[in-house]
């Protein structure tokens, strides 16, 4: 496999995942009334956050150099501060929800991932020194659910719960992920994806109705109404399922340069900006016009189109100072 093919595969995976993030959020306003929306939403949330953590871990280096720390500060923490202020203001003044009391200690909606990624990168050099870093991360993730005060504040629960996915990605050898896909691997990947869709359909038909907080990784076992042993077993099972589906994504994702490659290379803009559009359309009543299977499919298509639109070079260039503020200081 050529160098360009190797780069394109990773960008294609990132492009697919960011599209799924936007599409998943586009389904949220329909969840209460559309079974198909619940099914697709559940299937997406079974793996897209863990897969993003996995890919981020694979692309992260275990170092505490001055350059690495500056990169964390400018590429993750600075955009977090800027967009935290923008989204809180948007919530209060445009959506009319009022000023949140926890906005200083709780990342807004989709911004938690920036905070968690910064924490993971800071801790990575330390945990790599341990004999079994992945096992340690799993113990931390399972143990976090035992603490009743672990939740949304400081994004602590998600940071701990998805930490094993980040470590697994960091430890995964590049050749494992980028090897040419055989028929057997493709078939196995397709079966894993089908299993995820099947679980989603079970949820949609009320045959199984787990609390969505299990998929968000944002609550402790007491908050989810689960006993310690049950909670740890459930979280361990979801972790295994998430990693299997992540592997399936790498096996099935195209390796050639295509539309996903460009989206993956400019993924930060659609990730940070799409919340304004989705919440704005919901406030304007746009999602109330969607119903049935056609409405769900239209929401999905709209989410995919929005991701592509916000990754357009013009939009990226126009908004770059918001999520790359260092450029402004470099010009001074």
Image (tube, rainbow, N blue to C red):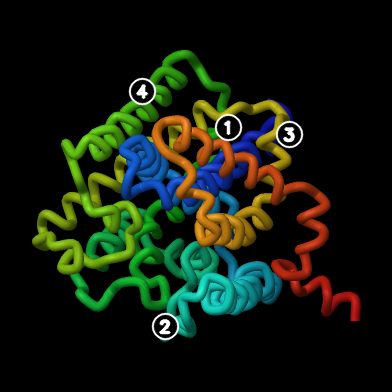
Residue on which disc 3 sits? 3
Residue 168 seen in the figure: no
Between the C-alphas of marks 2 and 3, the distance is 46 Å
| SS assignment at label 4 | helix
- Closest to the camera, between mark 2 and mark 3, is 2
For marks 4 and 1, the one nearer the N-term is 1
Residue on which disc 2 sits? 102
| SS assignment at label 1 | helix
Above/below status of 56 relative to 173: below
Between the C-alphas of marks 4 and 2, the distance is 42 Å
Between the C-alphas of marks 1 and 2, the distance is 42 Å
| SS assignment at label 2 | loop
Residue on which disc 1 sits? 178
Taking the spot 55% from the left edge, 62% from the top edge, the residue there is 62
Taking the spot 51% from the left edge, 26% from the top edge, the residue there is 252
Residue on which disc 4 sits? 191
Between the C-alphas of marks 4 and 1, the distance is 20 Å
Q: Quadrant of the N terminus?
A: top right
- Depth check: give the residue in front, 261 or 73: 261
Q: Are marks 3 and 4 in contact (CB under 8 Å)?
A: no
Measuring from the top left, give residue 193's x and y in whole percent. Answer: 39, 29
Measuring from the top left, give residue 222's x and y in whole percent. Answer: 15, 68
For marks 2 and 3, the one nearer the N-term is 3
Q: Are marks 3 and 1 in contact (CB under 8 Å)?
A: no
Taking the spot 53% from the left edge, 50% from the top edge, the residue there is 286
Taking the spot 49% from the left edge, 44% from the top edge, the residue there is 289
For marks 1 and 2, the one nearer the N-term is 2
Tell me where residue 43 sits by quadrant. top left
């Amino acid at each position: 496999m050529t160098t360009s093919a190797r780069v394109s595969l990773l960008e294609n995976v990132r492009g697919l995942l960011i599209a799924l993030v936007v599409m998943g959020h586009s389904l949220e306003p329909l969840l209460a009334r559309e079974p198909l929306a619940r099914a697709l939403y559940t299937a997406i949330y079974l793996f897209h956050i863990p897969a993003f953590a996995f890919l981020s871990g694979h692309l992260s280096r275990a170092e505490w150099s001055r350059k690495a720390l500056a990169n964390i500060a400018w590429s993750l923490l600075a955009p977090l501060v800027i967009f935290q202020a923008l989204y809180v203001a948007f919530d209060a003044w445009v959506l009319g929800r009022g000023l949140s009391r926890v906005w200083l200690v709780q990342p807004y909606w989709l911004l938690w991932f920036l905070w968690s990624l910064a924490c993971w990168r800071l801790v990575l050099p330390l945990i790599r020194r341990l004999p079994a870093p992945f096992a340690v991360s799993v113990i931390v993730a399972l143990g976090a659910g035992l603490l009743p005060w672990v939740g949304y504040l400081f994004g602590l629960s998600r940071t701990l719960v998805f930490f094993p996915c980040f470590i697994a990605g960091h430890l995964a050898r590049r050749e494992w992920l980028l090897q040419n896909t055989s028929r057997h691997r493709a078939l196995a990947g397709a079966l894993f994806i089908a299993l995820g869709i099947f679980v989603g359909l079970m949820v949609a038909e009320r045959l199984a109705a787990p609390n969505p907080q299990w998929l968000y990784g944002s609550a402790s076992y007491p908050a989810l109404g689960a006993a310690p042993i049950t909670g740890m077993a459930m979280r361990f099972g979801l972790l295994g399922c998430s990693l299997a589906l992540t592997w399936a994504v790498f096996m099935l994702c195209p390796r050639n340069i295509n539309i996903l490659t460009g989206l993956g290379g400019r993924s930060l803009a659609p990730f940070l900006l799409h919340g304004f559009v989705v919440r704005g359309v919901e406030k304007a009543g746009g999602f109330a016009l969607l119903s049935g299977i056609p409405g769900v499919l239209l929401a999905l298509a709209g989410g995919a189109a929005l991701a592509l639109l916000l990754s357009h070079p013009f939009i990226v260039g126009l908004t770059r100072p918001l999520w790359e503020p260092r450029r402004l200081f470099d010009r001074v």
